[in-house]
């Protein structure tokens, strides 16, 4: 299909419910994109946009936030993954709150999950047409360093896509799309700081990954500068939290989860006319 509108979804673990709120408003108002780039939680929650399941991301997070087998310390201690592989990527999507695999597959939107190749330290943009067949790439995109095991696929080891390209705005620019919508999970003006996390200690056998992680803050801040420049020139539309809502990466407080989702809904509704005008809907 001819790509005209690109949608970029930043990650941020449970902050990603902000994006889920925005996307639900999009679906309710028939606002579509031709291509989606989802990173980490942006991929995991954003896949519901392609499967057209309004409310699903919020629903299962509220229901299972305090289920020990969903995500958190118990899962990390017992499996080595903060997100329980069997619960999150098997039981949840096939039984507890089924993903609509058929709608996902038949939807013409091109969905890319961003992953980080541990050997090269570079991002890979994996086009996922069949979520059932390629669910491991979604898992890889959301595998946060230190608290997740690397995900092996076709001889490569992958971790969280945010390490190498947290907001793939430059990738979208290279695609020459007519319109770009960016959904961020941090308020305006947020900038990253140099990491103090022990990447070299944990991932010393992957020097390219260590180097990429060390330069994360530079790339992120340069991307934010560029996004804000394009936004000021009215070339793109950006949705971001209009106020700071403190949400832990592995948040168990369902009231806070509801609040960040509701903020996404209200921020999107306040910009709805502008978004429709921008994409010519």
Image: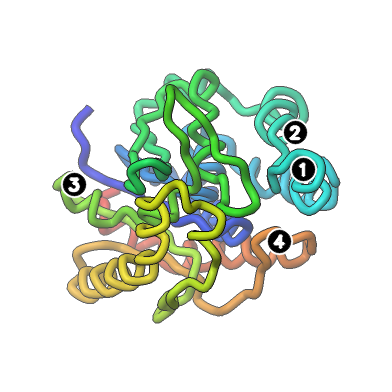
Spatial CA span between label 1 and label 4: 18 Å
Q: Say whether marks 2 and 1 touch (CB < 8 Å).
A: yes
Q: Of the residues under marks 4 and 3, which one precedes in the sequence?
A: 3
What residue is rendered at 27% in x and 71% in y? 222
Left or right of 193? Residue 261 is right
Q: Residues within 10 Å of mark 1 (few under 14, many from 20)?
A: many
Q: Position of residue 44 (x, y in %)?
A: 55, 42
Q: Position of residue 246 (x, y in %)?
A: 65, 74
Left or right of 46? Residue 171 is left
Spatial CA span between label 4 and label 2: 22 Å
Spatial CA span between label 4 and label 3: 33 Å
The residue carrying mark 4 is: 258
Residue 87, which numbered label? 2
SS of the residue under disc 2: helix
What residue is rendered at 54% in x and 28% in y? 135
Q: Of the residues under marks 3 and 1, which one precedes in the sequence?
A: 1
Spatial CA span between label 3 and label 1: 37 Å
Q: Marks 1 and 4: which is nearer the front?
A: 1
Q: Position of residue 121 (x, y in %)?
A: 36, 48
SS of the residue under disc 4: helix
Question: Is 259 placed above or below 73 here?
Answer: below
The residue carrying mark 3 is: 177
- Foreground residue, 134 or 146? 146
Q: Of the residues under marks 3 and 2, which one precedes in the sequence?
A: 2
């Amino acid at each position: 299909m001819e790509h005209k509108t690109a949608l970029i979804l930043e990650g941020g673990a449970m902050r990603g419910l902000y994006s889920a709120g925005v996307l639900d408003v999009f679906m309710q108002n028939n606002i579509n994109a031709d291509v989606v780039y989802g990173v980490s939680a942006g991929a995991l929650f954003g896949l519901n946009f392609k499967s057209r399941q309004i409310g699903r991301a919020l629903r299962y997070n509220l229901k299972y936030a305090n289920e020990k087998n969903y995500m958190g310390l118990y899962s990390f201690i017992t499996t080595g993954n903060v997100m329980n592989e069997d619960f999150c990527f098997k039981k949840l999507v096939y039984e507890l709150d089924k993903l609509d695999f058929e709608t996902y597959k038949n939807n013409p939107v091109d969905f890319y999950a961003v992953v980080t190749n541990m050997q090269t330290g570079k991002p890979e943009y994996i086009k996922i047409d069949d979520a059932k067949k390629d669910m491991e790439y979604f898992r890889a995109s959301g595998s946060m360093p230190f608290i997740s095991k690397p995900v092996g696929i076709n001889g490569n080891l992958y971790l969280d896509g945010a390490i190498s390209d947290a907001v793939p705005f430059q990738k979208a620019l290279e695609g020459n799309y007519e319109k770009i919508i960016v959904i961020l999970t941090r308020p305006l003006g947020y900038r990253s700081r140099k990491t103090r996390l022990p990447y070299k200690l944990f991932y010393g056998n992957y020097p390219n990954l260590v180097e990429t992680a060390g330069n994360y803050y530079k790339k992120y801040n340069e991307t934010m500068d560029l996004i804000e420049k394009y936004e000021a020139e009215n070339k793109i539309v950006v949705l971001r939290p209009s106020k700071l809502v403190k949400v832990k990466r592995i948040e168990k407080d369902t009231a806070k989860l509801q609040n960040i989702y509701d903020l996404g809904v209200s921020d999107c509704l306040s910009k709805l006319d502008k978004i429709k005008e921008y994409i010519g809907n």
